[in-house]
Image (cartoon, grey):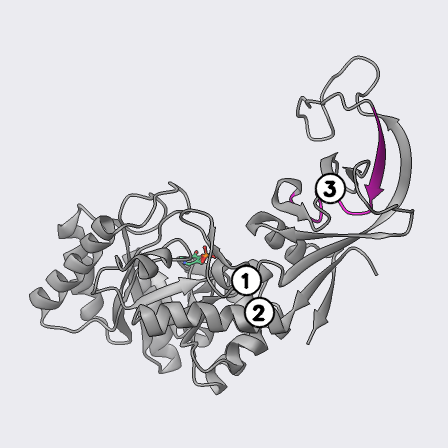
Amino acid sequence: MYPRLVIDLKKLKSNLDAVSHITKDEGGCSLMIVTKGLCADKEMVHVVCEHPAVDFVADSRVKNIKTYADEVRKSGKKTVLLRIPMHDEAAEVVKYVDLSFNSELSTMRLLNEEAKKLGVKHNVLLMIDLGDLREGIFYQNEDTIFETVEEILAMSNVNLYGIGVNLTCYGAIIPKNDNLSLLTALAEKIENKFGIKLNMVSGGNSSSIYLVEKGELPKGINNLRLGESFLLGNDTAYETKLPGTTSDALVLEAQIVELKEKPSLPIGEVGVDAFGQKPYYEDRGIIKRAIIAVGKQDTDIDSMTPLDEKIDILGGSSDHIILDVTKSDKDYKVGDVVSFTLGYGGMLKTATSAYVEKAYIK
Ligand SMILES: *Cc1c(COP(=O)(O)O)cnc(C)c1O
């Protein structure tokens, strides 16, 4: 059934080979693979668990981690929760998660209580904000950082596993040698001040991997967390393709339900579209318009690219996308299937939509 997301597991495996080569062999970092972009798809998780180079399997939601914690642990890897935990989920976190990212003492106190009840030691990574302004203690507030470390170290059932940073998410700040060096310097200060050794200094997501190739990743960074570069082959700092990866491991397929020649300009007074936006239309004269049975409920129209390069996406609404197929070499017919590669937003929405089926190439 269409629409469907076709997941090529062989291509995902070779993307994994490529990013693990860069991260581990060239970068000397441990490898954390992030599963949230594909909604922790089971088959994809198998590929990740079977890969010997992967050290950690991470997601932002406990609900996803719950589905694969057993498998990850059996394969000798650790589960990681990326989003700062809710107070509400502390009990679940200590049960299913081996390492959680944190920035709030009140939450870590709850994790400590719950870990005590369960008789386990829970690892935390303290997040430092280097200016992207999403999660983490602001790097300039060193006193707060040291006080937080001191209290964590005094906890009976919580272990300070390391520190980390997230960039290029809210503030779109690009990781560089200079800002990441602030993190490694801070790690050293913590180690010296408290006489401890941090296991992990995690230097970011798919926007940090380009630094390895440029030879600019600071020496003290020993972990990277990769979602998009594994799934789509992207370096997300400068939007380049990572060597050895493919961008078509995930393909969205949708079926044409109407194909007609009509004008390109709507007729009548222009108000707002189905989403309250004032649309802009380009006058292309009479064109061959195909409607495919997939819409904004299933995907992100701005985050998909037709494999047929001569197709243009004109726009869409909840359940329809309208294509201009006039220039295509193919003589499309109703019932034909049109395929798209996806960007991050398109991938996220298709993987989450209950209306998009999944198919696998094994
Ligand atoms: C989502 C996320 C990642 C992975 O990001 P990609 O850009 O997909 O590699 C890494 N770290 C944190 C904290 C995240 O929330």
Earlier-in-chain disc, 1 versus 2: 2
Question: Residue 345 at what x, y percent from top left?
Answer: 58, 48
Q: Residue 217 in the image: x percent, y percent?
A: 26, 59
Q: What residue type is labelled 1?
A: Leu
Q: Position of residue 184 (x, y in %)?
A: 19, 60
Direction from residue 208 to residue 89 in the image, left or right? right
- Confirm or deny contact between disc 1 and disc 3 (CB under 8 A): no
The reply to whether callout 1 and callout 2 are in contact (CB within 8 Å) is: yes
In space, the residues marked 3 and 2 are separated at their CA atoms by: 27 Å
Q: Mark 1 points at which residue?
A: 231
Looking at the rendered image, the disc whose residue lies closer to the viewer, 3 or 2, is 3
Amino acid type of disc 2? Leu
Does 331 sit left or right of 42 as displayed? right
Residues tagged 3 and 2 counted as in contact (Cβ below 8 A): no
Q: Is mark 2 within 8 Å of ligand 1?
A: no
Q: Residue 12 — which label?
A: 2
- Residue 22 seen by the camera: yes
Residue found at the far front of this picture:
329
Instruction: Look at discs 1 and 3 and give the one toward the viewer.
Output: 3
Q: Does the residue labelled 1 lie within 8 Å of ligand 1?
A: yes
Residue 289 in magenta?
A: yes
Looking at the rendering, the stretch of residues picked out in magenta corresponds to 286-300
